[in-house]
């Protein structure tokens, strides 16, 4: 049996032995385990940092060569099909926006739904006639 296996068995025995030992010893065991846990956590964090540094150094790109100066070329003028496509794109975007706005409007309750909800809130869950009568009496006072 190797040392790791012995340590594991000893750690698993600690809770079983807790019933037989004093509270001070239990506290000392907890402190010992916490200290070891912190050391293992620090070691793992250091390894993760080292791996991250290795990974980032592998991914680093070589510097780009400086562009050589060449004669500048003029950009081609947009053709008529390009302008038509941009107009179609604009229409598609406006249709998409209007469908989004329509969805928002559908999500909002209508004024009548809002009134019903308010009546139910103020007068309790009743039918509209009773709520209307109570509102009329309240207004008449």
Image: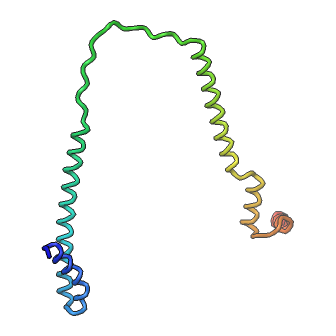
Question: Which residue appears farthest toward the front when viewing the image?
Answer: 1
Q: Residue at x 24, y 48 (%)?
A: 52
Residue 110 drawn at (x, y percent): 74, 51
Residue 7 drawn at (x, y percent): 17, 76
- Quick check: 13 above or below 81? below
Q: Please identify the quadrant where the C terminus is shown.
A: bottom right
Horizontal side of 129 relative to 35 (left or right) equals right
Q: Residue at x 24, y 36 (%)?
A: 60
- Quick check: 72 above or below 85? above
Q: Nearer the viewer, residue 27 or 70?
A: 70
Residue 51 drawn at (x, y percent): 21, 50
Q: Residue at x 19, y 77 (%)?
A: 31
Question: Which residue appears farthest toward the bottom when viewing the image?
Answer: 20
Q: Nearer the viewer, residue 101 or 65?
A: 65
Question: Which residue appears farthest toward the left when viewing the image?
Answer: 3
- Quick check: 103 above or below 7? above
Q: Residue at x 18, y 55 (%)?
A: 46
- Quick check: 30 above or below 126? below
- Picture quarter containing residue 132? bottom right
Residue 42 drawn at (x, y percent): 19, 61
- Picture quarter containing residue 70? top left
Q: Please identify the quadrant where the N terminus is shown.
A: bottom left
Horizontal side of 69 relative to 46 (left or right) equals right
- Picture quarter containing residue 91? top right
Total label count? Answer: 0
Q: Nearer the viewer, residue 86 or 119?
A: 86
Horizontal side of 131 relative to 14 (left or right) equals right
């Amino acid at each position: 049996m190797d040392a790791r296996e012995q340590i594991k068995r000893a750690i698993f025995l600690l809770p079983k032995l807790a019933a037989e030992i004093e509270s001070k010893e239990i506290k000392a065991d907890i402190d010992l385990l916490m200290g070891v846990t912190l050391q293992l956590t620090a070691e793992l964090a250091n390894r993760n940092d080292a791996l991250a540094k290795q990974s980032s150094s592998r991914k680093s790109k070589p510097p780009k060569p400086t562009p050589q100066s060449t004669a500048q070329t003029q950009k081609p003028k947009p053709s008529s099909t390009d302008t038509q496509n941009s107009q179609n794109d604009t229409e598609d975007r406006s249709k998409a926006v209007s469908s989004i706005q329509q969805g928002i409007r559908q999500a909002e309750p209508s004024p009548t739904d809002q009134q019903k909800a308010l009546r139910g809130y103020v007068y309790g869950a009743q039918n509209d006639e009773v709520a209307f009568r109570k509102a009329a009496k309240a207004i008449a006072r």
